[in-house]
Amino acid sequence: MKSNMLSFVCLLGIFCLITSFRFEKEKSLNGVFGEKGMFEIQLQSDNTFVYYHFKSGTEIKTTGTWQLLGEELKLRSDSAPKKMILNWKISASKNRLIAQKGTTTYMLYKKINCKF
C-alpha cells in the first residue's frame, strides 16, 4: 500500500513538473520591418525579401534573398544600392532588426498584422 502511494506521488510530481514548462511556438521572422516613408524590409517565407528606401519623394525598390545565420540576417541582392545595409542582427523576440553603419544605429520594428 505504501509503495503504491509512493509511486502515485512520484508520478504526480513528474506530471506537475512536465506541465509546468511552457513550449512557445517558434516565432516567424516573416513580415514587414521598418517605417513607411523611410525604409522597410519585407521578409517572405520563401527566403526572398523586398527592400524599400524612400528618399526625397523617390522610392528605391530592391529584391533578393535572405539567410538566417544564428542571430544574423544576411540580405543578398545583385541590384542592391551601395549604401544598403545587408547585415542585420535579430532581437531575441524576433520583432526587431538592428544594424550599425558608421556611427548610426538602425532599428527596424516588425509591423503587426501587415499584408503585402
Image (spheres, grey):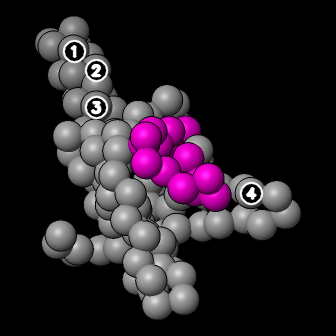
Q: In the image, what residue type sits under mark 4?
A: Lys
The residue beneath circle 3 is 18
Q: In the image, what residue type sits under mark 1?
A: Ser
Secondary structure under the numbered disc 2 in the rendered image? helix
Q: Quadrant of the N terminus?
A: top left
Q: CA distance from mark 2 to mark 3?
A: 12 Å
* Spot occupied by residue 56 in the image (x, y as percentages of width and height): 54, 89
* In-front residue for pair 9/25: 25
Ranked by sequence position, the earlier of labels 4 and 3 is: 3
Ranked by sequence position, the earlier of labels 4 and 2 is: 2
The residue beneath circle 4 is 101
Mark 3 and mark 1 in contact? Answer it, CB < 8 Å: no
Q: Nearer the viewer, mark 4 or mark 2?
A: 4
- The label on residue 10 is 2
Q: Is residue 30 above or below residue 74?
A: below
In magenta, the rendered stretch is 72-86
Ranked by sequence position, the earlier of labels 2 and 3 is: 2
Q: How dense is the environment of label 3, judged by Cα within 10 Å: few (below 14), some, or many (20 and up)?
A: few
Q: In the image, what residue type sits under mark 3?
A: Ile
The residue beneath circle 1 is 7
Residue 23 in view: no
* In-front residue for pair 14/69: 69
Residue occupying the point 85% across, 63% down: 103
Q: In the image, what residue type sits under mark 2?
A: Cys
Secondary structure under the numbered disc 1 in the rendered image? helix
Q: Nearer the viewer, mark 4 or mark 3?
A: 4
